[in-house]
Image (spheres, rainbow, N blue to C red):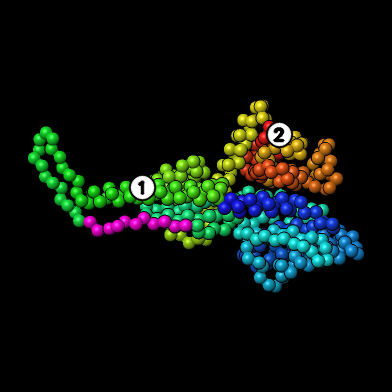
Amino acid sequence: MRMESQERDRLLKRLVGWRPANGILSVYIDVDPGDRRRAWRIALRERLRELEKETPPHEPRRAFEAAAARILVRFPEDGPAPEGRGHVGFVELAQSPNELWRSMQMAPRRVEVVRASRTYVRPLVELFDEGPRVGVALTSADRVRLLEWSLGAIRSIDEWEIVLWSRDWRERKAERSVPGEGEWTSASGRDQFGQRLEANRQRFLREVGGRVAEEHAKRHWRHILAFGVEGHVEELASGLGSSASRLRGVASDLISAPDPKVARRVEEEVRSANRAREEALVEELEEEIGSSRGAALGPQEVLESLGQGRARHLVFDADRDYAGRPLDAGDADRADSEGLPLAERLVELAIETGAEITPMEGDAAARLEPHGGAAALLRY
């Protein structure tokens, strides 16, 4: 739902505004169920040990140990891990720490534990962007299943099936006529029934398309994926109205597939749709260069435009290491003084000012290289 999307925004704003007195541990874990060695837990434990050694003794050390213990209790050495592939947590450095955890079926890029004066949210933003809420319509001639996919998990929303008052029919022989001008031959009963059945199926799919559009209006899906025979998808699309711009048709029959199989197939298509969306954003960015509204190009311009509240959409290379880049005056000095990597500061400012954020991968990210891996579309 749109409310759920707003909950993500509220969560991110809450996190960037959380500044505990002694700092915070931000934790990102990829729990690989097929890894019997539990390498992910070994990496987690070793990273916590490294950070503990770097922590001053006495009160700071005791606060760190309490926070680290809370994390390791959640992921016991011999017991089962919490349900879900990806786990994100924020634990206050205190002897009785406040903490916030979120589990999902998508995994972060790597196991990370970061200690800082504030939360480290860039990987969470990347997860939210890669796993948006998506509508999924599984179509056939006489049945449609509607589901919602998000962060690797899928759930049923609704299901419709065509109702024919009677499936019985009798074949009627075609009437004969005398050859000559104006002759005609009527269709058989079988043909007429087939025509009526096909018309009913087309009307059914168009009407269901309208129902899907209503759900999209409430839930604000980034994409609508429709799986099925091309003709069925086209009929569904004809009922979507303005929501058809979000539709991505896939020639694949999943109407009777179990949900786990559907979820895996949807994730593949979402990944492809995300890359196409990123390419379109880069095209829009290049069109805005030199326009009246313009665009911010390069880390410094983007930082300034975000600080002024002028940026409406931040884009950056998700795979680029921005840590340690020299920054200029103003907000850049603030970032340096607080030990924040550049990309983290860009993300923070975007969240604080309500700008959209799209981390980019692949070809779209490569096209940001001339701009130092960062750019922004501007509000004015």
Q: Position of residue 310 (x, y in %)?
A: 71, 36
- Magenta span: predominant SS is loop
Residue 180 seen: yes
253 shown above or below 243:
below
Residue position for label 1:
202
Residue position for label 2:
296
Q: Position of residue 217 (x, y in %)?
A: 53, 47
Quadrant position of the C terminus in the picture? top right
Which residue in the rendered view is the most extreme toward the bottom?
A: 78
Count the numbered circles shown. Answer: 2
Q: Secondary structure at mark 2?
A: strand
Q: State if disc 2 and disc 1 touch (CB < 8 Å).
A: no
Q: Position of residue 295 (x, y in %)?
A: 68, 32
Work out how far the residue at label 1 is from the one at label 2, CA to CA, in angstroms. 48 Å
Which residue in the rendered view is the most extreme toward the left?
A: 178
Residue at x-position 74% and y-position 43% = 349
86 shown above or below 180:
below
The amino acid pointed to by label 1 is Gln
Residue at x-position 63% and y-position 50% = 6
Q: Position of residue 353 (x, y in %)?
A: 72, 42
Q: Secondary structure at mark 1?
A: helix
Along the horizontal axis of the image, is 251 left or right of 370? left
Give neighbour class at mark 2: few <14, some 14-19, many 20+ (Cα, 10 Å). many
Residues rendered magenta in the picture: 158-169
Q: Per the image, is 230 magenta?
A: no
Give neighbour class at mark 1: few <14, some 14-19, many 20+ (Cα, 10 Å). many
